[in-house]
Every structure is written in structure tokens, then in C-alpha cells.
Image: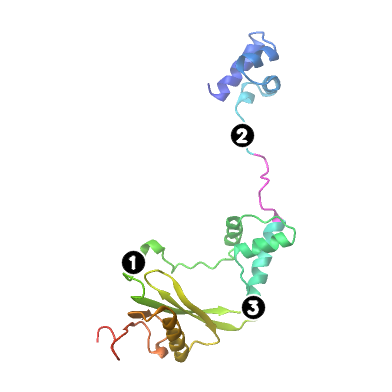
Amino acid sequence: MANRNRNRVIVLAVIVGGLTPSEAAARFGVGRQWVHVLLARYRESGEPGLEPRSRRPRTSPTATTPTTRARILELRDELTHAGLDAGAESIAARLERAGLPAPATSTIWRVLRAHDMITPQPQKRPRSSIIRFEAAQPNETWQSDFTHWPLADGTDTEIISWLDDHSRYLLHISAHPRITGPIVVTTFTHTADQHGLPASTLTDIQAGWGLSGKRWIWGWPDRKEGQ
């Protein structure tokens, strides 16, 4: 029986059928207090008062307060200008240290997006749209790349990495003031000494290194793929 009809039947059983609230409660398997609530609603609002009411609280106990939202935006700005990580997890950690309620990281991201604190990157494609080559076995192909990383004092640092294409195992990563050709060679030979020489390498790095966008085949002097 739908809640609305059940409520009507209970009230009718008391008002028309002459049952006491206790008798109606026992017959319909509800609490006596609930019968009194229904009767009070009926006297106040008539039949519409017997409609089921939402159980949703009038105020959400987990809603982000204006104070917390303001502090989220302040922390985002402070951390960004200090050159520190300004993601949702970092913001949440600092809210907790300050004794403020820390919302879920998803909530923090929503607050930042709502206030245009996140720069959209439409050039990014979903991973599912990318079809890439994968080496058939370990040490068949290593990939190398580099990225910039600003330190807290604003100093720019360049990071180079070597990755086994088949296993996706990170063979080497190191940071330098500036990546140069000798650093590329040194990191490669050091990594090869630890893991063995790969059959080939694939890079997408600065042309000044002489390796940009090339697949190099190792084992034959001065031989490049396609030559």
C-alpha cells in the first residue's frame, strides 16, 4: 500500500472507524506516536497533510559553508603564487590544519571550477582516443621525455626520465637545472648499465640533442631507423 493511502486509511480508522490511536497503531503496525502525528496533520491541513514528506534535511549538514568556500579560494591563490601544489588534496590538508571542516576533494574541485580558478585545457583528449604502439617485450624500446617543474622559490627545474615501453617501468628519473645533450647521454648510459642496453629508444625531446622525434636502433654504428 502506498504511503499516502496508508496514511489515509489509518486516519479514517480512527476518525470514522472509531479506533483509538493505540488500536490503530496495533492494527497497522505503526507506532502510536505516528498515529497522533497523522491526526494532527489531518486536522491542520486536511487530506493534503497526509502526503508523504521529504526526508531530506532542510539544511545539509555536509554543505560547504561560505567561510570554507572563501578559504578554499584563498588557499588556491596563496599556494599558486608560492609555487606550491595547489590541488584539492593540498587545500584539504591545510583546511584541516587550520581547524576548518575539509570537504571532499571532489567538492573542492567543484568550488574552484565554479569560481573559474581552474584553467580549462580543451587540447587534452581522453586516453581512450589515443592509439599507441607498445613494445612486445622488455628492453625492446625505451621512451625518454623531459618536463619543467618550478620550485617553491620560482627556480625552473628540468626533469628527464627513461621508461621501458613494454612494462611501463620507470627506469630512471632525475632533475637538473637544464637538460643538455651530455646529460641525456649520461643518464642513458647509466640506465643501460643497470638494466641492459635496449634494442631501440624513442624520444620526443629537444632537437638540439640530436634525438628529437626519432626511433634509434642500437647495435649498429650510426644507423637510424628508415635510413
**Position in image of residue 90 (x %, y %):** 63, 65
Number of the front mark, 2 or 3? 3
Residue range highlighted in magenta: 57-66
Residue 174 placement (x, y as % from top left): 52, 81
The residue carrying mark 3 is: 152
Q: Quadrant of residue 157?
A: bottom right
* Vertical placement of residue 222 versus 50, above or below: below
Q: Quadrant of the C terminus?
A: bottom left
| Amino acid of disc 1 | Ile
Q: Is residue 194 above or below residue 183?
A: above
Q: Amino acid at mark 3?
A: Ala
Question: What residue is rendered at 46% in x and 91% in y?
Answer: 182
Is residue 206 within the magenta segment? no
Under circle 3, the secondary element is loop
Label 1 or label 2, whichever comes before in sequence order: 2
| Helix, strand or loop status at disc 1 | loop
- Number of other residues with Cα within 10 Å of mark 1, as a class: few under 14, some 14 to 19, many 20 or more: few
Q: Earlier in the sequence, mark 3 or mark 1?
A: 1
- Residue bearing mark 2: 54
